[in-house]
Amino acid sequence: MSNVVGQRLPWRVMRWLNVHWPRAFQLLRYGTSNVNTAEHWDDAWRRHGRDGYRATGEILALLHVERRCDCSGVDIAPSAVAAVRARGFRAETTVLPAIPHPDAAFDVVVCTETLEHVSDARATLREIRRVLRPDGRLLLSVPDGTVDEEEVHVHRFSAPRLERELAPHFAEVHVERLVDDMEPTLFATASGIRQ
C-alpha cells in the first residue's frame, strides 16, 4: 500500500525525500523503511557479484597479500560470504549492528560503503568500537551524502555528520573527501577508543 502512495507523489517530491529523508522515501517507494535485507543483497550479489561489485573479498585479499594480515569478514548476503570463504578467508553472515566476534578482537576494522545501508548506524559504530582493541583503528568509507542519491541508502553522511557520529566512540577522528572517476567518497580514520 505504501508504494502506491509513492507512485502518486510527484517525482520532484520523491527525489527530495530520497535525498533528505531516505527512510521515508524507501517506505513510500518500496513499502519498507530499509530495503537492505539479506534477500536484497543476496540477489544483488548473485546478479552482479562477479563483475559489478568489487567487495567479494578483494580488500581481505589485498590486506592479506600486501600486509600479511589475518583477515575476517562479515556481510549480510550469504552469497557474498560464500564468495569470501571460497577465497580462503573467514567470513560470517550477519545483519549489522551485530558483529559476531568477541570484545577487543581486532587491531583494525575496515568498513567500506556499508554504514549508509544499515538501519542503525550509531549502534553499528558502537559495535565496531566493541570489537576493536583499545589501540585499534577504524578505516571507514561512505558516499559523500551531499551528492549521493542512491535509492537503497538509508543515511546520507556529510563530513561534519560523519565526524559527529564517530566522535563519541573515538578520541581521534579524521574525515576527508576523496574524488575519483566515480562518486565522491568520505574516508574516515578513527582511533583512541572512548570507553
Image: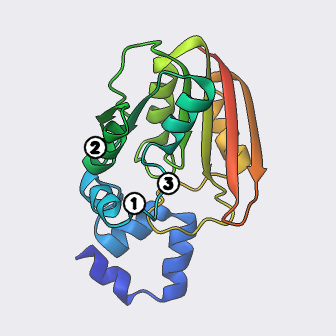
**What amino acid is found at the position of numbered circle 3 in the picture?**
Arg
| Quarter of the rendering occupied by the N terminus | bottom left
Q: Which amino acid does label 2 sit on?
A: Ala
User: Which of pointers 2 and 3 lies earlier in the amino acid sequence?
Assistant: 3
Circle 3: is it few (<14), some (14-19), or many (20+) Cα within 10 Å?
few
The quadrant holding residue 165 is top right
The residue lying toward the viewer, choosing from 7 and 95, is 95
Residue that mark 3 sits on: 54
Q: Is residue 55 above or below residue 136?
A: below
Answer with left or right where residue 83 lies relative to residue 170.
left
* Residue depicted at 53% across the width and 78% down the height: 15
* Front residue of this view, candidates 53 and 24: 53
Question: Which secondary structure lies at badge 1?
Answer: loop
Which residue is at the far front? 65
Q: How crowded is mark 2: few (under 14 residues within 10 Å), some or many (20 or more)?
A: some
State left or right for residue 143 relative to residue 116. Answer: right
Residue to which mark 2 is pinned = 82
Question: Circle 1 sits on which residue?
Answer: 50
Quadrant of the rendering where the C terminus is positioned = top right
Q: Which of 46 and 67 is in front in this view?
A: 67
Q: Which of the two discs, 2 and 1, labels the residue nearer the N terminus?
A: 1
Amino acid type assigned to the residue bearing label 1 in the image: Arg
* Image x and y of residue 167, in percent: 66, 29
